[in-house]
Amino acid sequence: MATQDEIDPVLVERFAHGNGTVFVGAGISLGARLPSWSKLMSPLRADLGSAVGPNTSYLDVAELYEVKHSRSVLVQYLKERLGDVRFQLTRTHELIVGLPVQRIYTTNFDTLLEQASQKRQINRNVIFNASQVGFSDTSTLSIVKLHGDLSDPESIVISARDFYSYFGRNPAVADLLKVELQTHTVLFLGYSFSDPNLGMILGNAANQSGAVRPLLYSLQLKPSELSVRAMNARGVKVIALDVDSGTSDADSAVEDWLRRFRQSLISFERRKHSFPAGAVSERERSLPAYRKHAVRRNAMLERIKAGLSSDFRVVMVKGAAGIGKTQLVAEAVADCVHPPGTYMLDDAFEQIIWIRSTVDAGPVGHSLERIFETIAAGADTSLYNLPDREQRNKKNQSRINALLQERRLLIVIEDFEDPAGVPGCPSQVAGKAAGAGTQRRPAEHFREIRAWLENAGPYANPKSRIVVISRSAIVAGFVVEVCRLDEDEAQELLREQARSLLLRRHCPEFGEQSARELLRIAGGNPQAVKWALCLCNREGGHKQLERLACLAGEESDVVFDALVGEIMRALDAAGREVVIAMMVFPSEEWIAAELLQAALSRQAQDTGGRNATRKVMLGCVRFGMLEYDAGKDAYLMHRTTREVLQRGGVTVFELDQVKTRLAAYLLRFLKNVIRNPDVPEVYWNALVRDDMSKVDPWWPTIDALVRWSGECRRAARFALLLVHYMDSRFLNSQRLACIESALQAKAPLKRRTRALLHIDALAWTFIEENRQAEARAQLEAGEKLLEDGGDEDLHALAEAWRARLDIVDRRIGEAHRHIAEAMAYANTPFCKQRPWILARVEMMAGDVALMGGNAESARDHYLASAAHADLYGGEGDGYQTNPRIGLALMEILDKEKQPDKESMKSARRIFERLVENGDVATGRLYGQYGLALIAARENASREAIRQLEQIMREIRRRSTGNVLLGLAEKSYQQILDASHGG
């Protein structure tokens, strides 16, 4: 028997791998103040009088009542007792629907699970009769109501006759249960040992499982030793909670256990991604794709590793295009990172930050701003946001250099090129690099980055290392020259590639002579070997080598152009379209097959159907133009392939057509995933919700399309859908660029929409970035567009944000005046119909009160904000309001001589809920801070203070101006002062 302090690791592992299912009984609904079965049946017993005795089961009571009055009267009674709106949703129900399961089975009539999934914005499918079983969808949560639903009287299972004939009348449900019990680990919640529903399910499990015994667990409240033994005899492992059933302590105990179970699942998931064998780790996600069948060039690998172990800050890996530089670096650095939580070896790094080049950065591939931003984002560090570019770069350079000294990071800058060494590069022509915000020459960008790499200031020998991959740049450091394959390596690669392509089957004429000719043409370049083999991989393909013999001894670019040109001619029209479509996606990113297919023309998609399109895509893989990962069902295009195609005459018009199709598809996808159907207004119907995690894998592609200058007409539509998503992901620079692009779009925005983007999107982002003057400027620009009637909501927001700015500047009188004006606007009938506005105004009123020293008023405002948010489904599980409520409660407790235990308990639960919500990093971090604050307050030991200081440093690294940071600083300083005073 497991105790309440232990979570069975087998249970955790099974659920974490998606192999769990949950059964929910009546005990779970008691916390929502629904009646127990005895209370529900008590009026029926009274009505039946002497016809029933005290030991008559509730099933028999219900059947006798139905016989006496009719089924419709019985169902009406159930609706009256169980459909009352006073029964409120509990946190326990929310935790249950948040478990990683495909189906939840319940024997309850209430709709609390449905309400919980709606609040958590989880797509759900409710099944309460056999005809609906076939509609079970793996992409949604299925709530299977075994005893029916009150909306369908025929589905109700309440009487003995209903109960004992259930599986005979519902064979489809019986089959579903059979499969579930044989293939999944089952967790029973809310069932006592004597519950007949549990007995029926366990009996069905025993009858159907045969020799294979399912894994069954049951959460039991204060079970007797005898009942535990009986449950074990039935094959059920009991999880015992030492509380009496039907009490508030029981509700809290179940909720606490579910919270700890969820946290165990999160911890398991994180461990699963921390480099165990066979798992996809954070390390591997940071690296580019490994090339299959690549020759392991041990000498080159050891040379790179020697550079990483040397005293040089920079390791320079140079070589021609297609020579295998990126592959070698990926293999070398993958062996140099230690798993989190393990002892750190002297030659190991704690994290890889791989910085890929971007098209909008021009021929250099990078800008100093983008490099700093990527390092900061990867290391959870904040940067300065000074208006002057030179001062900003100088301050940020000091911060990044200090970071590289404090931590042992491995930074890889891929494809950093000297524009003077790039053929055909107009190095003196001005170009706008990503993040620069000004027109600057590529040569200036190059010199700026090289100066940073070569001059570390006081950090000449930092703990971190920077690997630079380049064809043309020269940077002082440990240099590794990647040369062509030697004869043995080239022959090994040819044999490997030939086997993988089944070359002998497709071109039996390919022999030793062909192999020698191919290697002579490829000149020891791995990419050329691959393309030449792919070109030969068809009947008579070896004859192509005769026409290409003249390429022997030519520069690699000439060989590449000729080989790719021949491959494109060999592809049919559909294949060429697939290759061109792939060019619009971000470089070196795996692209889902679904997304690639969406970029094709209707003609290409309709020809032969989906399977035919897939064959065309795989044909491009066979010709070496793409790579395919069957596990991901995704495709990748090598950067060198992209460059050769760009030289080969693919037109801007062709690429723009692909982008137009892809943008239209992604807009439809975003609408389906992001828009909240319960909120009618554009922009506000895209507030933070759980389903936004589905956007994350496609974000690089979406980001590239949002920044596509030729797609200005769609810029506003992207902005209105993504503005809150970007806020929740700390994508502030992208958010600002996206909104500014929308405001400058060719298709003019409506006056009110423009005002909204200025006031809420831009001004709030600048407030978050601690850029006060720019925030005020955006508020003024937005207010100029407002009208006296019909814009009360935007007036309210503008006044609320202005109050927030004033309280930070210690203009207390002005802050109170502005928040009073905001509240006055919020109380108009127009605003009262928009709870998302009321939630924001109340939240800012709370900030003003808390920063002004009135924690009690702040708490009340924050609670009002949370209540308004609940009306439209909330935002990211309260990631904005819950930290504030917790901080306000902590400040109230600090003022009390004898702190209220219930308030402390409430604060702890709020912070624990934030820690559970792993999708929103801000909330999780402040949850950890709150729990550390409580621990330090309860026990001001050196270890507790150290933990609090560590989390506070993490918060400061993430942002210097985050709104919540200012609220947290006060409590933090009080704890430090108290500890030092002691």
Image (tube, grey):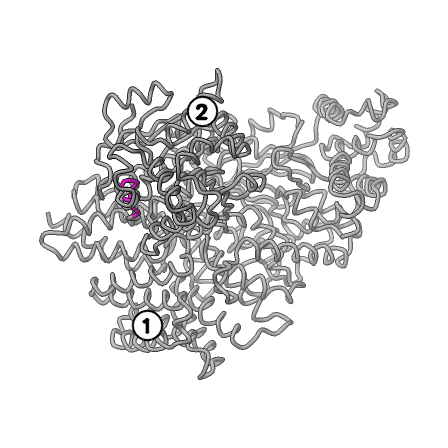
Q: Residues within 10 Å of mark 2 (few under 14, many from 20)?
A: many
Closer to us: 787 or 420: 787
In the displayed structure, would residue 405 be above or below residue 308?
Answer: below
Give the x, y percent position of residue 582: 70, 47
Circle nearer the viewer, 2 or 1: 2
Residue position for label 1: 803
Q: Residues within 10 Å of mark 1 (few under 14, many from 20)?
A: many
Point 36% across, 63% down: residue: 868
State the SS at label 2. Answer: helix
Closer to us: 98 or 692: 98
Q: Earlier in the sequence, mark 2 or mark 1?
A: 2
The magenta stretch is 34-40
Residue position for label 2: 205
Give the x, y percent position of residue 477: 52, 40
Give the x, y percent position of residue 532: 80, 33
Where residue 570 sits, quadrant-wise, is: top right
Give the x, y percent position of residue 940: 16, 44
Which quarter of the rendered picture does the N terminus lie within? top left
State the SS at label 1. Answer: helix
Where residue 780 sits, quadrant-wise, is: bottom left
Residue furthest top in the image: 211
- 805 relative to 454 in the view: left or right: left
| 479 in the magenta segment | no
